[in-house]
Image (cartoon, rainbow, N blue to C red):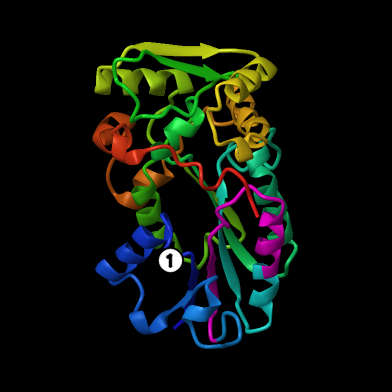
Amino acid sequence: MPVFVLTGANGGLGQPMLATILKENLILVSDLRISTTKASSVPAEIPYSGGNVLFLVSFPSIGEARFALHRNGIDAAKAPGIRHVIYTSLSFSGPGGNISVAQVVEAHLQTEAYLKQSGLTYTIVCMATYAHLWNNYAGFLWLDEDPAVPVDAVLPGDGPAHWANREELGDATARIVANWVRPIHNQTLTITGPELLTGVEILQKYLKHTGRTGGARVLPVEEAIAWHMQYVSVPPEQASFLDNWASWHTANSLGESAFVDPTLERLLGRKPRPVDDQAGEIFGEGNGLDTKDLVGI
């Protein structure tokens, strides 16, 4: 039986993935190895020792070191005998595409190319944008501010995207990992949500759910970036991120995410949750504004 090495098992995607594996007995516990970046929390050992299949979750950062960490993870997999790598990428650039104007995808595309040339077999899983991160797209709104204040969201372009629930993506990924054998060797899978929504449309859903007033303005990229810098929409030390953020909207305006793929529904065995079904979770103050990964290491 193969032994699976899981990275990122304590993260937002990895936790529901591991929970599904254990709950449904998709993989024997004895055949699982958990890898962590916190070396002090585990005994010293050879990276991935004893493993045959590596689940390599992408590092949660947009920094320059992201690809270097992914490359190191792939290189480290070769020595102990890993045969197959399952890597989590992003679904910009269309189904199976390898070109995107979204800067957030650069390290992913580099990693995909490196993995394909590594000599290992692979499965690349290109995932939709997490629905709970809608606020990063829709203008960095502070959801806990006075609800009587009209919302003024400024976007640097706009276009449809296929939002998905992160827990459902983790659930689906568990089934990909457990069924890693052919025919998904040397294949790229794309997992999207069940609907297409622009940034303006998802903001309108937020306003409807919360009862707030206001709207969104779509401005040219440079004007939108200048507006967000003027009004300090993100922490000042993260202002350089705005150019990267604007490129996501440019990618969507070019139609890079304007498609829905049935793979998630097939893996779940049911209809994935649309944004309206997640409204109570993603539009409440408890969701907040997630800026921790807006600058990298």
How dense is the environment of label 1, judged by Cα within 10 Å: few (below 14), some, or many (20 and up)? many
Point 35% across, 55% down: residue: 171
Q: How many marks?
A: 1
Q: Compare residues 2 and 247 and report the one nearer the observer.
A: 247
Secondary element under disc 1, as helix, strand or loop, is: loop
The picture places residue 42, in percent across and down from the top left corner, at: 48, 83
Point 65% across, 62% down: residue: 70
**Rendering quarter of residue 99:** top right
Point 31% across, 22% down: residue: 146
The answer, for residue 202, to whether it is visible in the render is yes
Quadrant in which the N terminus is drawn: bottom left
Callout 1 amino acid: Ala
The picture places residue 189, in percent across and down from the top left corner, at: 53, 50
The answer, for residue 272, to whether it is visible in the render is no
The picture places residue 272, in percent across and down from the top left corner, at: 32, 40
The picture places residue 153, in percent across and down from the top left corner, at: 47, 18
Residue stretch rendered in magenta on the structure: 50-72
Residue under label 1, please give it: 9
Q: Compare residues 14 and 112 and report the one nearer the observer.
A: 14
Look at the image and say whether residue 60 sits in the magenta stretch. Answer: yes
Point 26% across, 23% down: residue: 209
248 versus 177 height, above or below = above
